[in-house]
Amino acid sequence: MFQKNKLTFYIIIAMLLGIACGYVIHIRATESFITEFSKNIKLLSSVFIRLVQMIIAPLVFSTLVVGIAKLGNLQTVGRVGGKSLLWFVSASLMSLLIGMVLVNILEPGKFIELSQADNASLKDLMDKREAFSLQKFVEHIFPKSIAEAMATNEILQILVFSIFFGVAAAGMGETAKPIIKALDSFSHIILKIVGYVMNFAPIGVFGALSAVVAAKGLGIFEFYIIYFAYFLIGIAVLWAFLLGIGYLILGKRMTELMKAIGNPLLIAFSTTSSEAVFPKLTQELERFGCKDKIVAFVLPLGYSFNLDGSMMYMTFASLAIAQAYGINLPLGTQLTMLLVLMLTSKGIAGVPRASLVVVLATCAMFNIPPEGVALILPIDHFCDMFRSMTNVVGNALATTVVSKWEGELAPESIKADS
């Protein structure tokens, strides 16, 4: 049992050590040392994230092409894609709606201290805001070069090219089989690399947490405890909704699914990156019993269209900022904002702090001071931990549910290799 869960054990130990180390540095060291320490220790997390990013593009391309080819024809691809998008749109709207309803009931913005704004970190987000114009949005979807898309890990662009490639390969029948067989072998090699890369996860977790705790300290919660607590209520409601729907469809296997993805959830939580667990999540879902062709098709789509935790936070944060400035938005305006967020948030996977970039653009659009994003920046890392974990739950559930709908979910988990 320990052999099976030792990575999870090491990650938990790394989390505790990282928090302890960061806290000691925060209360004992000088400000200049803390700044230098946080910058350098965060390299451990950066190395781990970069190792994972190294394998995402080849994994998405190879597994998606093979998955589409195995689906067999355009009719099947369209059916599976349609069911996936139905789930994604429904889950996204519900996530946004939960955020909107709770922020109106709890009014967390009234408890935000205007004096705690982190204006220094705001500039980076302001520079990224232009990425959400209509032109940039369209360019973000359609690749002009698959090499460039892979080099920059543009998941949505890789997805578009892979769908064209997979459909073309499926249409060629026997002629394309050697290519599909080669890509199938290639994807298994990449998944083998995943196992090696995941051994670095505890080191990355230690670096990420020690850096943020050293820089901000645990005292940050004294100023944002109510805002953060209300945000956690929103996450809890969203989890209850997702797990409830999952239980209605999957029955008792819902518990088994949560156990299966426990390791990816912990990594996403501690590194604040749902993208970092994409390869590992692929493995775990296949072991759970989802067909590889469904996982290969639905999971990459989910990472571009189904970020439930981030979606809930977008309405929550946007309206909380309005409340902090005493701006009263009518219900009609809030619903319009919800629809805008629904559209502008698609394809943001892999964009650093993407949720805040979208919030920044949305605030400007609805005459909410965009500088207000600086008010929530100090606590954002801790919120991001729960957002990332929720994104993983949403995508794992979407993939499993579509597998169930397609009759492609094995009755029992495939045992993991020892």
Image (cartoon, grey):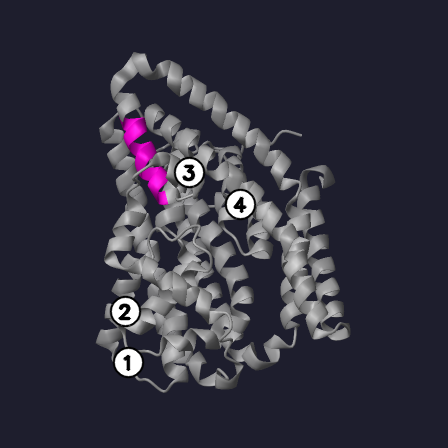
Secondary structure state at the residue bearing disc 4 = helix
Question: Upstream in the sequence, badge 1 or badge 2?
Answer: 1
Main SS, magenta region, reads helix
Q: In the rendered image of this protein, does residue 80 appear above or below residue 394? A: above
Residue holding disc 2: 337
Dot in front, 2 or 3: 3
Quarter of the rendering occupied by the C terminus = top right
Q: In the rendered image of this protein, does residue 390 appear above or below residue 333? A: above
Question: Upstream in the sequence, badge 1 or badge 3?
Answer: 3
Mark carried by residue 150: 3
Q: Residue at x 39, y 61 (%)?
A: 128
Mark carried by residue 277: 4
Q: In the rendered image of this protein, does residue 259 appear above or below residue 71? A: below
Residue 335 in view, yes or no: yes
Secondary structure state at the residue bearing disc 1 = loop
Q: Residues within 10 Å of mark 4 (few under 14, many from 20)?
A: many
Instruction: Decide which of 29, 387 is in the foreground and name it.
Output: 29
